[in-house]
Structure formats: C-alpha cells, structure tokens
Image (spheres, rainbow, N blue to C red):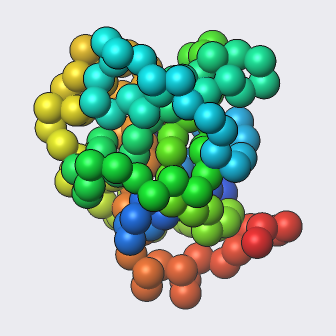
Amino acid sequence: MLQDQPQAGTCLVFRVESLACALPLAAVVETMRTLPLQRVQSALAIVAGLAMIRGTPTPVIDTARLLGTSKTTPTGRFVTLAVGERHVALAVTSIIGLRAIAGQDLRALPPLLASADSSAVSAVGALDSELLILLQGMRLVPDTVFAAAPAAAGAP
C-alpha cells in the first residue's frame, strides 16, 4: 500500500492552531519542546528555519503556513519526522497524544494537504518528493473521531 494511503495503527495526533492532525507513528522520530531557530534567507516561506536537533541542523516546517491557516504558528512543540535518511521537524501548536485508528477510519479522514496552500505544496514537491509523500499521508481529525479512537497504550 502506498504511504499516502494510511494503514491501520497508532497515530500521533497533534494540533496546528485549531486543526487536529494525525500522522502514522512509524514516521515520527520524536516530539520535543521548541528549540531556537536559525533563519535561512533563501528558504521557502514555509520553512521556519533550522534547529539543532541532536547535533544536526534540521529544517523546521511552519505547519500553519503550509496549511494556509496563518502567517505564523503559535508553536509549542516540534514533531521530528524521518524522511528517507534525513530528519525534518514540523512546528505544531500542541501534541494531543497517540491514538489507535482503524485503517478504514484513517483512510476516510480528509487529507491534511487538501486545505493546504497549493503553492507551498508545489514548492515542497519540487524540492523534496519524499517529504511530500510523507505529508500526503497526514490526515485532519475531526473531534468526533476522538470518542471512537481509544488512546494507545501508554499515551497521554
């Protein structure tokens, strides 16, 4: 099954402003408090900057800008993702926790990028197709899903 067709399993659920988003846990390296950012002059507008994560300069994507919800994210956490052999961090508002979501339920959720800024998505795709494939697997999660999706073992 393609990565943009989510499979059953545990997902990390997080907020970008008021939007709840789900990402298959297999793509997540770690979550952490925000770190200082070094701005990159020539970077796309959706790149908030570079953060030193585990001694490696890591690009941080401003997820709110990517989704077109605002010009800046009230960032509370970073979600570090494995993209091929590299890491990329998403700047998100908050972490909700881990949820077990059945494959058919996950596939029925709207894709995160459906409401994204199309020029930002095109720019990501032109620069990093692996990251675009990973982002296409993310889903928007309506609050009603939380009642049906039990928290995964050990999740907050």
Q: Please name the residue shown 18% across and 43% down the image.
A: 117
Q: Measured along the vertical axis of the image, is residue 126 above or below residue 30?
A: above
Residue at 71% over, 27% down? 53
Q: Is residue 148 above or below residue 15?
A: below
Task: Name the residue nearer the viewer: 91 or 108.
Answer: 91
At 15% from the left and 38% from the top, the residue drawn is 118
Residue 79 in the image, given as x and y percentages of width and height = 61, 44
Q: Residue 26, located in which quarter of the rendered image?
A: top right
Which quarter of the figure has residue 78? top right
- Whether residue 104 is visible to the viewer of this picture, yes or no, is no
Left or right of 20: which side holds 117? left
Q: Quadrant of the C terminus?
A: bottom right
Task: Decide if residue 78 is in sight here.
Answer: yes
Residue 45 pos. (x, y %): 28, 30
Look at 14% across and 32% down and name the residue there.
119
Q: Residue furthest left?
A: 119
61 left or right of 45? Answer: right
> How many numbered circles are shown?
0
x, y percent for residue 121: 24, 32
User: Residue 10, percent across and down?
Assistant: 66, 57
On screen, residue 29 versus residue 62, left or right, reads right
- Is 31 on the left or on the right of 123, as rendered? right
